[in-house]
Amino acid sequence: IMPSLVGSEMCIRDRLNMETPEGRLFSKKYPITGYPTMFFINNKGNIVHKIVGKHKSKQLIREAKKALEKAQNIKNSKK
């Protein structure tokens, strides 16, 4: 398991086996459309951002930044 993103309300889990009971339960709430799929989920359980497919490290960092920006925008719009 990877560490939480400092200063955010999100954390990253590196993988989940979708064939386990935990994986099947997860997929009922968060549909998987392809492998690999990365969800960025806020502390309320809502998907903030989702990426599907294999990506290079730099692209994953860009996508994580997008997710953090979206999460911050959502948080600010509710103030």
Image (cartoon, helix red, strand yellow):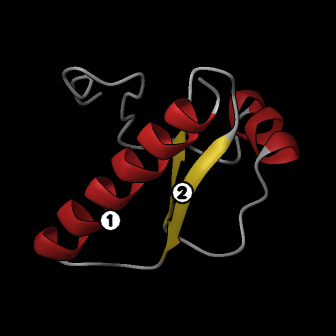
Vertically, is 51 above or below 20? below
Name the amino acid, label 2.
His
- Which of the two residues, 2 or 41, is positioned nearer the viewer here? 41
Q: Secondary structure at mark 1?
A: helix
**Which residue is at a point 58% across and 20% down the rendered structure image?**
43
Vertically, is 47 above or below 4? below
Quadrant where the N terminus is found in the figure: top left
Q: Residue furthest left?
A: 58
Name the amino acid, label 1.
Glu
Residue 37 picture location, percent across and down: 53, 63
- Residue 49, numbered circle: 2
74 lies left or right of 4: right
Vertically, is 47 above or below 10? below
Q: How many residues crowd mark 2 within 10 Å: few (<14), some (14–19), many (20+)?
A: some
Q: Which residue is mark 1?
A: 63
- Which of the two residues, 74 or 46, is positioned nearer the viewer here? 74
Vertically, is 25 above or below 7? below
Residue 68 picture location, percent across and down: 35, 45
**Which residue is at a point 79% across and 57% down the rendered structure image?**
31
Residue 11 picture location, percent across and down: 37, 28
**Which residue is at a point 42% across and 38% down the rendered structure image?**
72
Separation of disc 2 and disc 1 at Cα? 8 Å
Residue 78 picture location, percent across and down: 65, 29
**Which residue is at a point 11% across and 72% down the rendered structure image?**
58
Q: How many residues crowd mark 1 within 10 Å: few (<14), some (14–19), many (20+)?
A: some
Marks 2 & 1, CB-CB < 8 Å contact:
yes
- Residue 21, numbered circle: none
First in sequence, mark 2 or 1: give its number: 2
6 lies left or right of 12: left
Q: Secondary structure at mark 2?
A: strand
